[in-house]
Image (cartoon, rainbow, N blue to C red):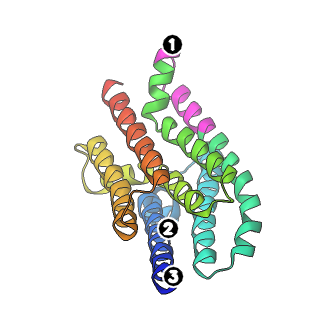
Amino acid sequence: MLNTEQSARNETRQLFLASALAIAALMFVGFAKNYYLRAWLGTRAISPMVHVHGMVMTAWVVLFLTQTLLVARRRTDLHRRLGIGGAFLAIVVVALGAYTIHNSILRHHLAGSAELYALTFVAFDGLSLLLFGGLIFVALRLRSQPPIHKRLMLMATISLLPPAYGRAVAYLTHRHVQILVLALMALSVLVCVSIDTLRHRRLHPAFGWSGGLVLISNLLTYLAQIAD
């Protein structure tokens, strides 16, 4: 019985580590041309605020990967210490992301009314950003319950993927980008949830409702984009 439980825990660690590595790779690929490899690819200059936003988002992905590695290596002591800084970093991610979206809306003169502003905010992945903040908040409140905590943290970080997916898809085609991003986000959620469910022979409630919220937020984003 103990060997079976230990094997299940090891498989769970492998799933979360693989997910963290995949997220880091997707973020790099998505923003390689316009951010990480911009100096070598000769793309247009970016503003200091966009550069700061990029550094903050990179810091979150690096922190998430580091935290996952620490758990995989059973260094939960360091994991908890870094978690304090992670809470503050998550606040910065949401605040800076919202500020960046707000500036983008104003720069493109898309704030003609409150309704139009809200619609554009959702179309610019603002809803996913707010969902990230909400999931992180709940995950931190439930950090004493690791099975729930780690699943919410994973879903929160997955919710940040649409901009990276959008740019990665645009490298290949400029047709149907929005629906392809929606499909990729659904696939990301379903793959993680399905593997976890098959290994534990049940759907974990935290994955069920958080994954559902990620799917709903991306569907609403898609609807806002095609209505915009």
Q: Is residue 161 above or below residue 224?
A: below
1 or 3: mark nearer the eye: 3
Per the image, label 2 sits on a secondary structure element best described as: helix
Quadrant of res 196: bottom left
Image position of 99 (left or right of 14): right
Determine if the magenta segment contains residue 114.
yes
Per the image, label 1 sits on a secondary structure element best described as: loop
Name the image quarter holding the C terminus: top left
Mark 2 neighbour density, 10 Å: few (under 14) some (14–19) many (20 or more): many
Q: Residue furthest top?
A: 113
The residue to which callout 1 is attached is: 113
**Overall secondary structure of the magenta stretch?**
helix
Residue at 44%, 24% in the rendered image? 119
Q: Is residue 161 above or below residue 10?
A: above
The answer to whether residue 221 is visible is yes
2 or 1: mark nearer the eye: 2
Residue range (magenta): 98-115
Q: How far from the left and from the top, in percent, is residue 86?
A: 70, 58
Query: Which mark, by number, is residue 6?
Result: 3
Q: How far from the left and from the top, in percent, is residue 123?
A: 42, 32
Q: Is residue 222 above or below residue 140?
A: above
Residue at 45%, 63% in the rendered image? 32
Determine if the magenta segment contains residue 111.
yes
Residue at 51%, 75% in the rendered image? 13
At label 2, the amino acid type is: Ala
Query: Which mark, by number, is residue 175?
Result: none
Q: How many marks?
A: 3
**Quick one: 21 or 153, which is closer to the camera?**
153
The residue to which callout 2 is attached is: 20
Measured Cα–Cα span from mark 2 to mark 1: 39 Å
Q: How far from the left and from the top, in percent, is residue 154?
A: 51, 59
